[in-house]
Amino acid sequence: MNATPFKDKTNLERVIGYYDAMIAKDFETMGSYLHDEVEFIGPLAERKGKASLIAAAENLSQILDKIEIRSRFENDNQVMLAYDFLFPSLNLNLRSAGMINFKKGLIIRIEVFYDGRPFQQKQEEIFTDQS
């Protein structure tokens, strides 16, 4: 199903809801923001499809404590964020940027930009489907 469950929200509010759900480990709600054909592009991996992205988020959430959004911009069907991903167990504050695109009110593409070197050892754990 690709109906927009959050019709009264802006795309920026949807992105914030998506990341709030990820931090809360509420993957059902997180998934409700995603288009079935969502695409993820990052320095360590590329993923396609809602189930694949949710699986990666579940793995990431095991070490991710908090996301602090420092700046945000919205234009039509695109949101751009500057944010910090906080990983206390790794003693790491990962400064990142994300470009999120929407189609029919759902996230269709997430492209993130960060220095992936601190994650090279964790890459397989995060981006491997456990199913």
Image: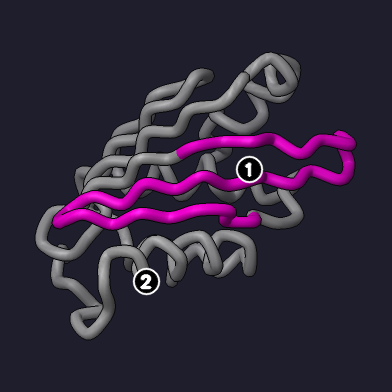
| Residue depth check, mark 2 versus mark 1: number of the one nearer the observer | 2
Task: Residue 99 in the image: state x and y as whole percent.
Answer: 35, 40
> Based on the displayed image, in which of its 4 quarters is residue 117 positioned?
top right
- Identify the element where label 1 is drawn: helix
- Identify the element where label 2 is drawn: helix
Q: Which residue sits furthest left? A: 104
Name the side, left or right, on which 117 lies relative to 73.
Answer: right
Kindly identify which residue carries mark 1.
59
Name the side, left or right, on which 116 lies relative to 29.
Answer: right
Considering only vertical position in the picture, is 62 above or below 30? above
Name the side, left or right, on which 64 lies relative to 28.
Answer: right
Considering only vertical position in the picture, is 111 above or below 28? above
Looking at numbered disc 2 in the image, what kind of residue is underneath it? Answer: Glu
Most common SS among magenta residues: strand
Nearest the eye: 90 or 62: 90
Q: Earlier in the sequence, mark 2 or mark 1?
A: 2
Task: Residue 51 in the image: state x and y as whole percent.
Answer: 37, 47
**What stretch of residues is rendered in magenta?**
68-97
Considering only vertical position in the picture, is 107 above or below 115? below
Q: How many residues crowd around disc 1 within 10 Å: few (fewer than 14), some, or many (20 or more)?
A: some
Residue at left 27%, top 41%?
Answer: 109
Residue at left 67%, top 29%?
Answer: 125
| Disc 2/disc 1 C-alpha distance (Å) | 24 Å
Name the side, left or right, on which 58 lies relative to 80.
Answer: right
How many circles with numbers are drawn on the protein?
2
Residue at left 46%, top 65%?
Answer: 16
Residue at left 63%, top 62%?
Answer: 23
Q: Is residue 21 magenta?
A: no
Kindly identify which residue carries mark 2.
13
Task: Residue 78 in the image: state x and y as whole percent.
Answer: 23, 50
Q: Is residue 84 magenta?
A: yes
Looking at numbered disc 1 in the image, what kind of residue is underneath it? Answer: Asn
